[in-house]
Image (cartoon, rainbow, N blue to C red):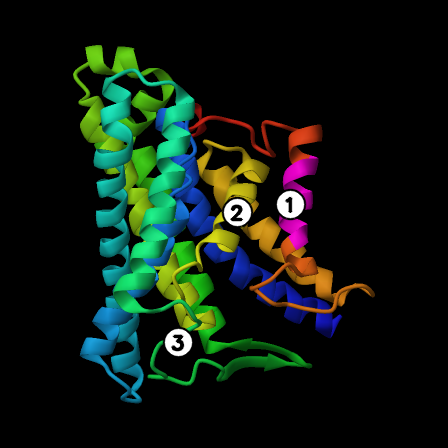
Amino acid sequence: MQDFLNFLVLGLTRGSMYALIALGYTLVYGVLQLINFAHSEVFMSGAFGSYLVVNLVAGDTFLPWYGVIGVLLLGMVSGGIVGAIVAYGLERVAYRPLRRRGAPKLAFLISAIGMSFFLSQLAGKMFNRQKNNFFPEYFDANKRIIEVNGVHVTLLQVIIIGSALAMMLFLDQLVSQTKLGRSIRGVAEDAPTAALMGIDIDRTIARTFIIGGALGGAAGFLFGTAFGFFNTMGFIPGVKAFAAAVLGGIGNIRGAMLGGLLLGVVEALVPSAPWGTSQSWIGLQWTDVVAFVVLVLVLVFRPSGILGERLGRAA
């Protein structure tokens, strides 16, 4: 039972980051009916951008608790801003010109994949970060703040889970309660009718990319803090987040949240099975296979996902 609960905490930590990345996929799919396969590089750019800012401000200084809070907020905000900028650039360069020309969906897919490779290689050349790198240790991330009967929760796990849940709840309220959220849902439900009602389609789509990019960039900072970062770091988490979005119901915000958390928990429980031997994030280990198995099973038995609603009808 102790091992199960510890793996459960680990799964919620992983799943929280998957959910934040999955929200970017599901938001873009909701309004465009397309998968933004360059979103994994938005996630990567958030890690690099936040590293530059945090390293400039905090350096290698071990900080008091109030300094840690400030740096964490700075990292998530800077990662989110960088992610939002990159996502907006993707929309303007890789999607909007094709959309205005009425290009087939295959063209969007090829454009996104091309931008994904471009951003990954650009990060590798600009920052020479092709190997794993880590944020400065400005606080004791492995400090156990909860430890009961062999079950322990570290400070970093609390930060990741708490921050992710707060951002997910904020997005849910934004989409369901605000004017921008109504615009996003209107475009997702019926774009031509939304345009007739006075909604600026291009602006709404751009803002959707920005919101998804901000969440992905913040997830990049959290991931980099926990596991390190490099220019190809987005591929495996990106694929898993896509699987999570499909699991919960692609195009459904709450489905992406649920799918991310479930996938993280299922992955974490695999190493506790007799055949589980690794919890590595890098390389094809059992924990990585799980995401692909889940994706195939969902597509075979429930293609619409657990909740199975599009963004326009989900809120």
Number of callouts: 3
Inspect the image, locate mark 2, and give the three-letter code of the amino acid beneath it.
Val
Give the distance between the C-alpha atoms of the residues marked 2 and 3, in whole angstroms.
22 Å
Query: Is the C-beta separation of discs 2 and 1 under 8 Å?
Result: yes
Please provide the residue range marked out in magenta. Answer: 289-297
Residue under numbered circle 3: 134
Residue under numbered circle 2: 239
Residue 309 position, x and y percent, is: 51, 26
Does the magenta run of residues contain 201? no
The answer to which image quadrant residue 26 occupies is top left
Residue under numbered circle 1: 292
Name the main secondary structure of what is drawn in magenta.
helix
Whether residue 76 is visible to the viewer of this picture, yes or no, is no
Instruction: Judge by depth and name the residue closer to the eye, 65 or 226.
Output: 226
Neighbours of disc 2 within 10 Å: few (<14), some (14-19), many (20+): many
Farthest-out residue, right:
274
Q: Is residue 182 left or right of residue 149?
A: left
The answer to which image quadrant residue 313 occupies is top left
Q: In this view, does 136 lie to the left or right of 256?
A: left
**297 w.r.t. 46: above or below:** above
Report helix, strand or loop for mark 3.
loop
Q: Which of marks 3 and 1 is nearer the N terminus?
A: 3
Give the distance between the C-alpha atoms of the residues marked 2 and 1, in whole angstroms.
8 Å
